[in-house]
Amino acid sequence: MPLRDEPSAAPDDLDLTAELARDLIRFDTTNYGEGRSNGETDAAEYVSARLTGLGLTPTIYESEPGRTSVIARVPGRDSSRGALVVHGHLDVVPADPENWSVDPFAGTIKDGLLWGRGAVDMKNMDAMMLAALEDILGAGQAPARDLVVAFFADEEAGGVLGSHYLVDNYPELFDGATEAISEVGGYSITLGDKRAYLLQTGEKALIWIKLVARGTAAHGSRLIRDNAVTRLAEAVAVLGRREWPIRLTDTTTQLLAEVARILDVDPQKVGPDELALATGTASGFIQASLRTTSNPTLLKAGYKHNVIPDTAEALIDIRSLPGEEDAVLAEVADLVGPDIEIVVMHRDIGLETEFDGPLIDAIVGTLGRHDPGAPVLPYLLSGGTDNKALSKLGIRGYGFAPLRLPPELDFPAMFHGVDERVPLDALVFGRRVLTDLLSDY
């Protein structure tokens, strides 16, 4: 049945989804990158115990000590149909408690929201997955088709020790799977006075590089023209300020046409950036999907105030449009010049798939039953997900973690942001929608 407008649950009367998400937030699974992590083991064991309690037989995989993923197969009513992978990740990015108004790992409930690192990225979806399975299996039912339920490690560092490890070493886990759903899609946006939902049908490529500048080590009082820090700073500024040109893909072309239709504006007179901005807070994701981005994220150089170091380094997070990876790297090399060494730390493909087919129809129909009249639009994610790894097995991945959100919530800002939070009633909505989808598709 469609979700009725309801007041947010009180802290002593939480929906199961909020309870599960709160519990998962309380496991500090911080992934610092470059091999440093608190690990996912405690959270993985919690998830495994919940799955076991449902009569499933989950398996825990440890790619390195503490780097833990959980996989379980759920038999469906019709196992002859292609299996659906439903996946989340258990790791989160760092959170500095000094910057937060709440403890980022306390799972605080206040103002009708669940606060904490992972509340939207993506322990909310992990909880929806578990709650939906409890709704289906607890009622003595089965999903429509086989499900491969996966809770991966290491997504926040490119999935090397999580999804990629399992795809490369245990591909049989995904036998029969043809499609997948995961994070950063299925959430609502507000266009004018109308609610719509974004379904993620593609994601940009990922290129993480390190810039290395070298120069002469010397006393800080000397005149040194080949200062490594200066060279690095110039290269960082060039990349950080680079205005990459707009290039619309099939997905972004279709999205902007639908935005223009809903807002009743002429897309020939209103440019892509203006249309993206018209989506309100959703523009935080959509604008970045119209072009390549190159953001400096970390600087490292020196060890004392009066010593000029001979080496300086910077990390740059580049997200190119699908298929443009080599061209973007070549342009980066031209921009920073021959004196800067470029080290590719991690690289992964972009994805784009059509906004059609039985799964799309099922998602659109399910959302339509729970929020009648709200259109569903395709979009290209400016970041990336574990769907990149699954694509190596020919599995088509989509972003579908359904949330009905209030217009005032800046949802894109919640991802890796301070005071990450999600409305409790959005979690209830997501549980119901996901339960229906898995029961019927």
Image: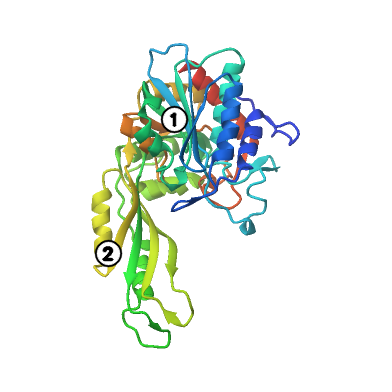
Image quarter of residue 379: top left
* SS at circle 2: helix
**Amino acid type at image mark 2:** Leu
- Whether residue 338 is situated above or below residue 327 in the rendered picture: below
Q: Is residue 412 visible?
A: yes
Which residue is disc 2 drawn over? 335
- In which quadrant of the rendered image does the N terminus lie? top right
* SS at circle 1: strand
For this orientation, the residue located farthest to the bottom is: 222
- Whether residue 297 is situated above or below residue 409 in the rendered picture: below
Left or right, 44 with respect to 178, comes to: right
Q: Is residue 430 visible?
A: no
- Looking at the image, is mark 1 or mark 2 earlier in the sequence? 1
Q: Position of residue 395 (x, y in %)?
A: 35, 29
**Residue at point 38% right, 30% down?**
170
Q: Position of residue 141 (x, y in %)?
A: 56, 13
Nearer to the camera, 22 or 291: 22
**Amino acid type at image mark 1:** Ile
- Whether residue 178 is situated above or below residue 276 in the rendered picture: above
Q: Badge 2, how many Cα within 10 Å: few under 14, some, many 20+? A: some
Q: Position of residue 251 (x, y in %)?
A: 34, 37
Nearer to the camera, 405 or 420: 420
Q: Position of residue 433 (x, y in %)?
A: 54, 25
Nearer to the camera, 388 or 172: 172
**Residue at point 64% right, 37% down?**
23
Which residue is disc 1 drawn over? 181
**Residue at point 40% right, 20% down?**
83
